[in-house]
Image (spheres, rainbow, N blue to C red):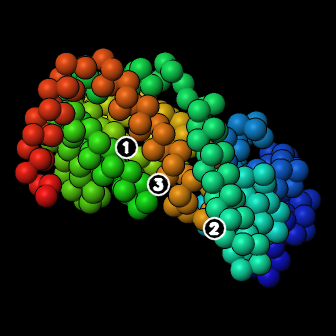
Amino acid sequence: MTQNVFETISSQYFDLTNSEKKVADYVLGHRIDVQYMSISELAEECEVADATISRFCRRLGLPGYNAFKLELARASMAARTGLQRAPVSPAADGFSALCKQVLGENISALEQTFRLVDPDQLMRAVELIERSRRVVCMGQGGSMVLAQEAWTLFSMVSSKFVYVPDSHLQINTLAVMEADEAVLYFSYSGSTRDLQDALEVARARRVPMILVSRFPKSPGGQQADVVLQCGVNESPLQPGSVSARMAQLLILDLLFQQLCSRNQDQVDEYRARIAEAAAKKHL
């Protein structure tokens, strides 16, 4: 693509259908915002079907929506939102300035997540975890680390949490799960092939899924039983950012604290037993 994506949209504008022109108008008017939206969110804003968005992307010579967002990010690198300020150079601006910028980005991620937390969805997740015989923690890529963190945290207060990192083993695990178990899945985008594969098997087995994601209207968000929305916008050119993980960690901590408060006697017992066993590991 010799032109940037905005130039391509403009040059092909009069060849688009009426529905595709609605998409083009929205994209040209919201150049920065669109790169952070899921395909379903963009379709809703444009009042068109998801298929129209996919067709629009192919009209531009792109294989799909993710490739489209990547081109948007490349074309918009000079434009920065309030969260994505111009980078600070430690040599030119000093290490203190860099620390303040990073701190501000992480605080913004936590504040956004705080505003997005749905208490009803959080309580549904807690109740689902409580009544489940086993909870399997899953994720892929950077989100796999969050799944491992969830298992590590919850294993301090319960023995029913399991961590399965490999995508093939995740499918194997889901295939033999029962309806009285549950899945805690981390996916920032909510629209990966691994998540879709997992959801397909989970739904066939009637295994409920709790999804921690930025996009509740993503393909995964629309199929999950409970969606816990985290904040912070992550550019397609900056996957796996620390601020995005901080946002998901806040959701995880809220889930953990709420579960502990409802099962305090068991939590105290587990913590005492673990502290006694772990004491032998300290010098």
Occupied quadrant, residue 218: top right
Of pointers 2 and 3, the one earlier in the residue sequence: 3
**How many C-alpha atoms fall within 10 Å of the one at disc 1: few (<14), some, or many (≥20)?**
many
- From the top left corner, tell me how far across and down residue 73 is, in percent: 72, 65
Q: Does residue 23 lie above or below 225 as drawn? A: below
- Labels 2 & 1 near each other (Cβ < 8 A): no
Tell me whether circle 3 and circle 1 mark residues in contact (CB < 8 Å): no
Name the residue carrying label 3.
192
For label 1, the residue is 185
How many angstroms separate mark 3 from mark 1 (CA)? 12 Å
Q: Tag 1: residue type?
A: Tyr
**Residue 132 appears at what percent x and percent y?**
22, 26
**Residue denoted by label 2:** 237
Whether residue 49 is visible, yes or no, is no
Q: Is residue 135 visible?
A: yes
114 shown above or below 266? below
Lower position in the chain sequence, tag 3 or tag 1: 1
Q: Amino acid at mark 2?
A: Leu
Image quarter of the C terminus:
bottom left
The mark tally for this picture is 3
| Chain-order first, disc 2 or disc 1 | 1
Residue 163 place in picture, x, y as percent: 23, 49
Q: Is residue 277 above or below residue 129?
A: below
Tell me the residue at 55%/29% (across/down).
117
Residue at image position (81%, 73%) is: 4
Which residue is depicted at the point 11% across and 55% down?
281
Q: Is residue 19 left or right of residue 61?
A: right
In the displayed structure, would residue 217 be above or below residue 81?
above
Q: Amino acid at mark 3?
A: Thr
Question: Tag 2's secondary structure?
Answer: loop
Q: What distance separates the C-alpha of mark 2 from that of mark 1?
A: 23 Å
Q: Nearer the viewer, mark 3 or mark 1?
A: 1
